[in-house]
Image: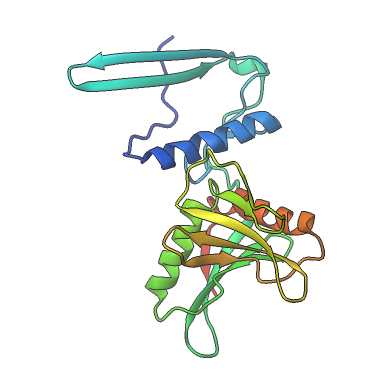
Amino acid sequence: MSDDPIYQETEPRTRKGLASYFYRLSRALRRGEPVPADEEQSVTVDPAAESDLTVDVTRDGDEVNLDIGMSWTESDEGDIETDVTASKATFERYQDTADEWRWRLVHNNGNIIADCGEGYASKQKATQGLDSVKENAPGAHILDTTKDESTVENPETGSDATFELFTDSAEKFRWRLVHDNGDIIADGGQGYASKQKATQGLRSVQTNARGAPVVDE
């Protein structure tokens, strides 16, 4: 039986971008969840408990190809989904009382799990800000500044931003997503009573930001 292409995509990616992509795949595999094939997580596959892994390295003139493939019998496990809304959140883009543009990431349960923290002069700038969060949040590592010595979790993942865990003046735990250029591109918008709750909050952003739809309020 010939191959039946269901989804294909070819695009240039940086080494960091590749690391972020493979990190999302590995996290889904570890959790036993459907694996997202695309950046928007709208195409997912449910691999069998045991699959065949194929790795090929080839050279064609000046072009080198590293092909990594998984294969299994479809009847072994779940379906292939091609129209998935994997995210459980929505980006809401709106104007505040000062006529500045803002965004917030709202979970399906009604909780605001992230916001931009500042107003933008234009809708375009606000959109660029939330797009940066979509791109960088999933693979951003976590810098825990609440310990005597700051520690980094997941330093191998690829992103141009870092989640910083910290305590505020009221000794509440907070997080912010800081771009490599020093800009704060997202924050939790609230203080948490425990570091565990703050970490859960940023993990929800990591999971839901990429595939979240954008609506205007």
In this rendering, would 64 be left or right of 15?
A: left
Q: Residue furthest right?
A: 193
Towards the viewer: 213 or 132: 132
Image spot of residue 215 (x, y percent): 52, 67
Q: Is residue 36 visible?
A: no
Number of labels in the image equals 0
Say which residue appears at 22% left-offset and 16% top-offset: 60
Q: Position of residue 177 (x, y in %)?
A: 56, 60
Q: Between 124 and 114, which is closer to the camera in this rendering?
A: 114
Residue 174: percent from left, percent from top: 69, 65
Relative horizontal placement of residue 156, taking residue 120 as reference (left or right): right
142 or 3: nearer the viewer: 142
Q: Which residue appears at 47% of the width and 19% of the height?
A: 69
Colour logic: rainbow
57 on left or right of 109: left
Q: Does residue 68 lie above or below 39 as drawn?
A: above
Residue found at the very far bottom of the displayed protein: 98
* Whole-percent x, y for residue 183 in the image: 46, 67
Q: Quadrant of the N terminus?
A: top left
Question: Extreme top residue here?
Answer: 1
Residue at left offset 60%, top offset 46%: 86
Q: Is residue 39 visible?
A: yes
> Is 43 rendered above or below residue 62?
below
Look at the image and tell me in which quarter the C terminus lies: bottom right
Q: Work out which residue is located at the far left of the displayed protein and give it.
A: 61
